Amino acid sequence: MSDNIRLMANAYILGIESSCDETAAAVVRSGEEIVSNVVASQIGTHAPYGGVVPELASREHLKAIVPVVRQALAEAGQTYQSIDALAVTQGPGLAGALLVGISYAKALAFALDKPLIAVNHLEGHIHAVLLEERQKGNRQVEFPVLALVVSGGHTHLYLVAQRREGWSYENIGHTRDDAAGEAFDKVAKLLGLGYPGGPIIDKLSARGNPAAVKFSPSQIKHHDRRRREKAIEAENRPRFDFSYSGIKTAVLRHVETHGLQPLIDARRKVLAAMVKPTPQDYLANCDQATLDLVASFQRAMVEDMSGKTLAAAQAYDVATLFVTGGVAANNELRSTFEREAAMHGLPVYFPSRPLSTDNAAMIAAAAYPKFLAREFAAMDFSAEAGLVLG
Ligand code: KG4
Ligand code: ZN
């Protein structure tokens, strides 16, 4: 292992990500240039079940990991020997899925005698934004940053600050039950709209009236007020928690009270007979009442996320907003955040859509400061399904 890491002009880090249902590998130069970025999605495997099946995910990762890593190296014009370090997602995620990436990364690092860096998946989502801004030549991002990490498993708010070469993260809010992406997926499933639900709800919402169905604020409010007040008293650090299981139940109740179930059953039947339904197929099998319901659901979700995030930004007087994770691909979420942030005089950054969802470039980018600080993983580290950030 080189002792001249700090003197190295360029560091090429091979990132590996296998926390959920994407097997991904990427090579990133010095945390600022994506040299290759390969993502093998398992959506086709899990779609018939309407959600990720952990055992199937591990099996698919095992099949994909070697070819995906080889492809990432080949597309980067790199070899196992030429890379400077390896980075792998340690958690949070599915334990069995994480283990596939970790075991392979450990074996490679050991055989090649290269440093190995363990990365928190949520830190990766935050660094996806920083990586792309650097790649565009923007080095003007001002701190502190408030980052909303919003995905299938998370709706987390972090205060992000720079500390010498590294970063510090303070969690000031998270979901008390379902994550935002999970709510999109569950609502799509109960409406017979396939998996994953986010992208299809995003597309269908453009055809519906977002003011048609009113969801009351109490349906997207967590009720554990005592804990919040105690937290404020204890540290004078207000919290901005989310809760999205109530809105899913409200959608279900709307379906029941408005007699939408027969149409949902019919749609399920038609779409199940199709190999790979397109957004047009979904649209052709939706009536206006369903499109209105979907658009109203998305509006309520987006308003809740943007409202709480902007309130937190004011409370903590941050300089910049980041919105990242799979749900950050949502069109209405982006336009709403852009509008609201502009009204508050705050710059807001998102990753490009391919880097919003799970990928390994973000893992390799988050590893770079750790590489400079020589924060290498001991060979006996393991997957941590519930790993926290900060
Ligand atoms: O970050 P990600 O790829 O995986 C996790 O770490 O969970 O996020 C996946 C989630 C899924 O719940 C998916 O429905 C949601 O992101 N998603 C979207 C959109 N694209 C993906 N949600 C809303 N609108 C979208 N366009
Ligand atoms: Zn993710």
Image: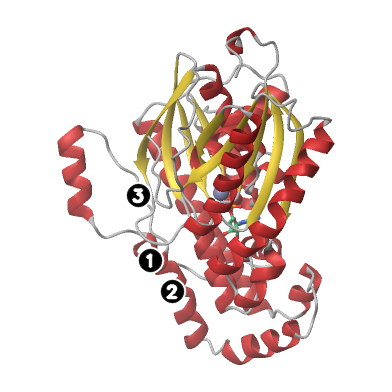
Where, quadrant-wise, is the C terminus in this rendering? top left
Gap in angstroms between the C-alphas marked 3 and 2: 19 Å
Nearer the N terminus, badge 1 or badge 3? Answer: 1
Q: Which of 19 and 142 is in front in this view?
A: 19
Instruction: Quarter of the image for the N terminus: give it.
Output: top right
* Residue 170 x/y as whole percent: 36, 33
- Residue 314 picture location, percent across and down: 39, 32
- Amino acid at the residue labelled 2: Ala
Query: Is any atom of residue 64 visible in this view?
Result: yes
Residue 31's label in the rendered image is none
Quick check: marks 1 and 2 in contact, CB under 8 Å? yes
Q: Can residue 349 be seen in this view?
A: no
Q: Which residue is at 45% across, 50% downward?
A: 155
Q: In the rendered image, which residue does mark 2 sit on?
A: 250
Secondary element at image label 1: helix
- Residue 95, placed above or below residue 213: above
Q: Which residue is drawn at 69% across and 80% down?
A: 287
Hey, what amino acid is under mark 1?
Answer: Gln
- Toward the top, the furthest residue is 7
Picture quadrant where residue 235 is located: top left
Task: Answer yes or no: disc 3 within 8 Å of ligand 1.
Answer: no
Q: Is mark 3 on a helix, strand or loop?
A: loop
Neighbours of disc 3 within 10 Å: few (<14), some (14-19), many (20+): many
Q: How many other residues sit within 10 Å of disc 1, few (<14), some (14-19) or many (≥20)?
A: some
Query: Tag 2, which secondary structure?
Result: helix
Q: Residue at x 51, y 36 (%)?
A: 119
Q: Which amino acid type corresponds to the residue marked 3 in the rendered image?
A: Asp
Can you give x and y, in whole percent of width and height, for residue 264 in the image?
Answer: 63, 85
Cα separation, mark 1 vs mark 2, equals 7 Å
Q: Residue furthest front?
A: 111
The residue that disc 1 covers is 219
